[in-house]
Amino acid sequence: MKKTSIIIMLFSMLAFLMVLSGCDVDGPLRKKMLDYYSDDDNYANYVGTIASVDKEHCYVEIVCQDDEMPNQTQYTVYGESSIYDTLRPDDEVILCSSPMYFYNSHNLPIVYLEKQSEVLLEFEEGKENLLEDIRNTFKERNIFEWLRDMLGFN
């Protein structure tokens, strides 16, 4: 009887692992983000002032002059990294972003950026870069690949 229970338990665990290996762990979040950011109606233009620029971690803090956006928050510019070289604290910018947060530590995206009437990032380019980044960051992978990536065994 005990041997039969052990065999049943082992087969159950094997079946459970087979089910997990077919699961796309990031699928629901990836789909939600792609659906949301693919819709142009989810973006708006804002005026803001650069508070700080972090070239190493590729984000910029901006104080927006709009009540719809958080007062000061971190943004990722979805363009060439050289854009960060052109930004300085106290620069006034016009940006296109979306106020939606999907997870903790998620920087809001900038898909259009203008400074002193010079367009630094066009909307279509920034939006496509954002969507591509989502596809790469939240690529299809099963639970074992996800664990390998999380533990750093690449």
Image (cartoon, grey):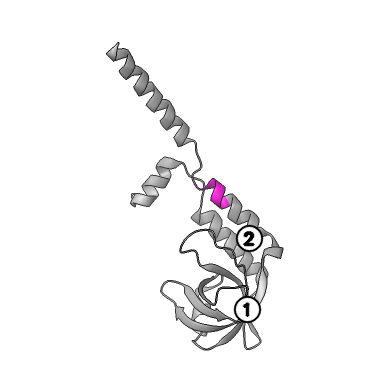
Residue 150 left/right relative to 38: left
- What is the span of residues highlighted in magenta in the rendered image? 26-30
Q: Is residue 27 magenta?
A: yes
Amino acid type shown at disc 1? Asp
The answer to whether residue 30 is above or below residue 13 is below
Q: Secondary structure at mark 1?
A: loop
Q: Give the image quarter of residue 118.
A: bottom right
Task: Name which residue lies at 46% across and 64% down.
Answer: 105
Farthest residue, direction top: 1
Q: For label 1, count other residues whose C-alpha is less than 10 Å away and answer few (under 14), some (14-19) or many (20+).
A: few
Per the picture, the main secondary structure of the magenta-coloured stretch is: helix
Task: Name which residue lies at 51% across and 53% down.
Answer: 138
- Residue under label 2: 37
The answer to whether residue 54 is above or below residue 24 is below
Given residues 9 and 111, the one toward you in this image is: 9
Q: Secondary structure at mark 2?
A: helix
Report if residue 154 is visible in the image: no
Q: x%, y% of residue 72? A: 52, 77
Give the foreground label among 1 and 2.
1
Q: Earlier in the sequence, mark 1 or mark 2?
A: 2
Callouts 1 and 2 close, C-beta under 8 Å: no
Given residues 100 and 24, the one toward you in this image is: 100
Q: Give the image quarter of residue 68.
A: bottom right
Report if residue 84 is visible in the image: yes
Amino acid type shown at disc 2? Tyr
- Say which mark, if any, is on residue 66: 1
- Say which mark, if any, is on residue 132: none
The answer to whether residue 38 is above or below residue 147 is below
